Image (cartoon, rainbow, N blue to C red):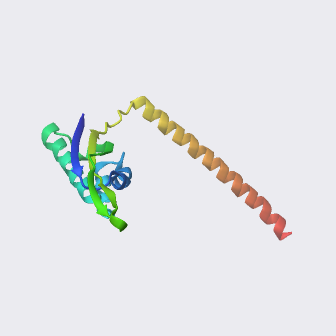
Amino acid sequence: MSVIAKLRYLRIAPRKVRLVADLIRGKSVEEAQTILNFTQKKATLPISKLLRQAIANAKNNFQLKEENLFISEILVNEGPKLKRVFPRARGSADTIQKKVSHITLVLEEREKPKINPSASLRVGHSAELSRSHGEQSRTIKTKKHESQSPSKSI
């Protein structure tokens, strides 16, 4: 189940908003909120508000748990540009483009992996094998150490 939240006509350039969006893409909701709290960019406030809105939509409309949510997709697109004229020397003029962003945030629920009982037995078995190999290497090291110590004393 995906939950979509949109923010349109944000008066920050999309290039600057993408810097913040890239930080939280693919992260869990709690981790994304922590990252946004400690990032010092102008775009963090609107994106954190949008994230809180998406979480509230997921809880109230779809009865999803916040712990299972992650940011599957965050898109920052360019909106219409506001064109202004800035006077320059000798009566000429430059145009200024004030850029606008549209942000789309998609949350999805992370599915917990189903544990197969036979797979867990295999994992435990391989762990025992790795332990036994580790013990063998320890015994070899101690034997080498013991064999070297008498040669030093002679």
Q: Quadrant of the C terminus?
A: bottom right
> Residue 5, percent across and down?
21, 43
Going 32% across and 62% down the picture, which residue do you hit? 41
Give 150 or 51, whichever is nearer the viewer: 51
Q: Which quarter of the figure has residue 57? A: top left
- Residue found at the very far bottom of the displayed protein: 153
Q: Would residue 104 appear left or right of 144 to someone viewing this image?
A: left
- Residue found at the very far left of the displayed protein: 60
Q: Which quarter of the figure has residue 113? A: top left
> Residue 136, percent across and down?
65, 47
Residue 103 visible in the current orientation: yes
Going 22% across and 39% down the picture, which residue do you hit? 3
> Residue 39, percent across and down?
34, 62
Residue 88 visible in the current orientation: no
Q: Would residue 119 appear left or right of 105 to someone viewing this image?
A: right
> Residue 53, percent across and down?
18, 49
Going 27% across and 41% down the picture, which residue do you hit? 106
Going 32% across and 56% down the picture, which residue do you hit? 95
Q: Which quarter of the figure has residue 38? A: bottom left
Q: Quadrant of the N terminus?
A: top left
Q: Is residue 124 above or below residue 32?
A: above
Q: Is residue 24 above or below residue 106?
A: below
- Residue found at the very far front of the displayed protein: 90
How many callouts does the rendering have? 0
Q: Is residue 130 above or below residue 11?
A: above
